[in-house]
Amino acid sequence: MSELSRDALLAVVRDVWDRHDPVPDHLVATMQAAAATAASDLDFELMELVERATELVGARGSSSYTLRFVHGDTDLLLRVAVDGDRSRVDGWVVPPEPMTVRALPGENPTDWSSVVTETGRFELTDLPLGLLRLRLEPHDTARPAFATPTFEI
C-alpha cells in the first residue's frame, strides 16, 4: 500500500465531506443577509455568544437549551424551549435595568416584545421556529440599544 501525499489525502477528505455533509442550501443566503443587516445598522452591536448548553428532552417531545450572551457589563441568559412548531424564550438580564427586549424573527415582520422586570426577567412566547435575533433597548436614552447575533431555534 502506498502513502498518499498531503494534497491527495486532503482531496479525498474534501470529496467525502462534500458528498456526505454538503453546505445547506440556505446557509450562504442567510449569512449574507445577517452580514448586510450588521453592516447597514450603525447602532447594531453584536453580543458575544459565551455559552450554549443543551438540556434533556422533555417527556412530551419538547426540547430546550440555554444560551448566554455578554455585552460589556450586561449579561444575558436565555432559556429557549421548543414545542412543536413554536418556541418560548425566558430571559434574564444582569444587572437588571429597565429595558424592552424585542424578538426579531428572520423572515417574519411581526415584532414580539417584552419589558424587563425589576429582577431582570422577561419572556417571549409563541415565537416561530427559525432565525431569531433579540434587540435590547434600555429605557435610559443615554445607553444605546444593542442586539444579539442571529441564532436559530
Image (spheres, rainbow, N blue to C red):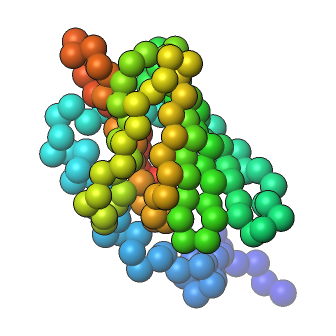
Residue 124 image offset from top left, x and y in percent: 48, 46
Q: Quadrant of residue 16?
A: bottom right
Q: Quadrant of residue 39?
A: top left
Q: Residue at x 68, y 54 (%)?
A: 64
Q: Residue at x 63, y 65 (%)?
A: 83
- Drawn side of residue 129 relative to residue 60, left or right: left
Residue 1 image offset from top left, x and y in percent: 84, 87
Q: Residue at x 55, y 59 (%)?
A: 87
Residue 149 image offset from top left, x and y in percent: 41, 44
Q: Nearer the viewer, residue 9 or 137?
A: 137
Residue 123 makes an appearance in the image? yes
The correct choice, above or below, for 141 with respect to 34 in the image is above
Residue 119 image offset from top left, x and y in percent: 56, 19
Residue 94 makes an appearance in the image? no
- Drawn side of residue 8 relative to residue 143, left or right: right
- Drawn side of residue 23 relative to residue 110, left or right: right
- Drawn side of residue 60 relative to residue 35, left or right: right
Q: Nearer the viewer, residue 15 or 73?
A: 73
Tally of marks: 0
Q: Residue at x 21, y 31 (%)?
A: 43
The correct choice, above or below, for 6 with respect to 78 in the image is below
